[in-house]
Image (cartoon, grey):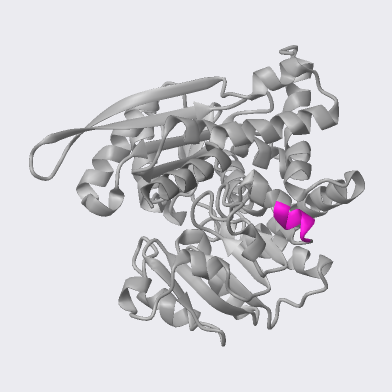
Amino acid sequence: MVADKAADSTKENHEVMDVLSSTRTVVKNALEKLGYPDEVFELLKDPLRMMTVRIPVRMDDGSIKVFTGYRAQHNDAVGPTKGGVRFHPGVTEKEVKALSIWMSLKAGIVDLPYGGGKGGIICDPREMSFRELEGLSRGYVRAISQIVGPTKDIPAPDVFTNSQIMAWMMDEYSRIDEFNSPGFITGKPIVLGGSHGRESATAKGVTIVLNEAAKKKGLNVKGARVVVQGFGNAGSFLSKFLHDAGAKVVGISDAYGALHDPDGLDIDYLLDRRDSFGTVTKLFNNTISNKELLELDCDIIVPAAVENQITEENAHNIKASIVVEAANGPTTMEATKILTERGVLLVPDVLASAGGVTVSYFEWVQNNQGYYWSEEEIDKKLHEIMIKSFNSIYNTAETRRIDMRLAAYMVGVRKMAEASRFRGWV
């Protein structure tokens, strides 16, 4: 029995390569398909800059705890780097590097004047007080202040970070810079220069491409059975948007389990009961596992939690005809191949979750101009960009007879590769 478990673990680890290796593999394939020489891949396979910082924070009990943080800047050939900061106990240097590459690809897909950046701190904010989180947020900004700024690298919210944390970070940077700098960071509260629609931007972007994917499959979203894995920022907003559009959200999950109702869950009730970290299933007795959730009978699955959820082990059991990746890397390379061969339309993460960076770009532009747009203007611009980007990737996949993930990487990497070439870097 122990030997069998060890063998299963080895097989799983072999399939689920670390996110950096798998990202590099697809980037390499995309560049080869586009005809770029090997030196372009050598430039783009790693961030241009990677900073590791140590952040001392005085805790509520009077002790000093030292946290480790990272900031990766993948490529700034197109423009300043841009990307979120996550607070999570599972943050690793490899993950931050991979996510910075994904941010470059997202910016290329939606045609923004950015390269990719990413940051993270190894911590568990669920076990920290408000005051401790503020100390950690300000300490991180002090540690990375020399390499970030409105024209260098613009942070944003990510896993377990929010508009309050962005506000503390902006305030700390403004103190260091001795100048009010709202353009230093996005995802801020509206009163501090935040943009309308930013909080729900990722979910809106996912909803837009989900609707486009449904059209390609001849599926009406109204009445469609949808499973949303994850009930944090993206997952909760997405569940609400789909519920309001008439879809039946038959399953949702959080870190502690999942809920299922074939007739559709009461999303408004669940939203009212969830806590600030997206936890709601602990309030219920009749829960199912995340594994069972993904294998439910449904039309559309939206993984909006963590990476490596759909693998070689369960891809054959997926019953949905559409998978839209709202999380980063929820489907492995082997599972992508299996789903594509089975005729499942997979909308990859670098496209589906690009709504967040798109509205972050709108926020940055508004900060730079000092002129702010209405939510209607934001929504209109977001719709135009996401629909254009979806069609570009779908047509590339159809024309070249490749999967949607490789097509997305090809579209995303081209602008960065061309900018690097024109600069004379390669």
Identify the residue shown where x is 36% and y is 60%: 277
As drawn, is 54 to the left or to the right of 161? Answer: left
Is any atom of residue 287 visible in this view? yes
**Could you tell me which residue is drawn at 65 percent across and 58 percent down?**
378
Residue 60 x, y percent position in the rendering: 12, 45
Query: Which residue is most to the bottom?
Result: 263
Q: Quadrant of residue 410?
A: top right
| Horizontal relation, residue 34 to residue 142: left or right | right
Q: Main secondary structure of the magenta part?
A: helix
Q: Which residue is outermost to the left? A: 62
Location of residue 19 with respect to 35 vertically, above or below: below
Extreme residue in the right direction: 399
Magenta part of the chain = 338-342
Location of residue 16 in the rendering, given as x and y in whole percent from the top left corner: 55, 42
Q: Residue at x 83, y 45 (%)?
A: 402
Residue 278 is one of the magenta-drawn residues: no
Residue nearest the viewer, comparing 273 with 303: 303
In the picture shown, does residue 271 fall above or below 38? below
Q: For residue 3, which quarter of the picture?
A: top left
Question: 283 or 71, which is in the foreground?
Answer: 283
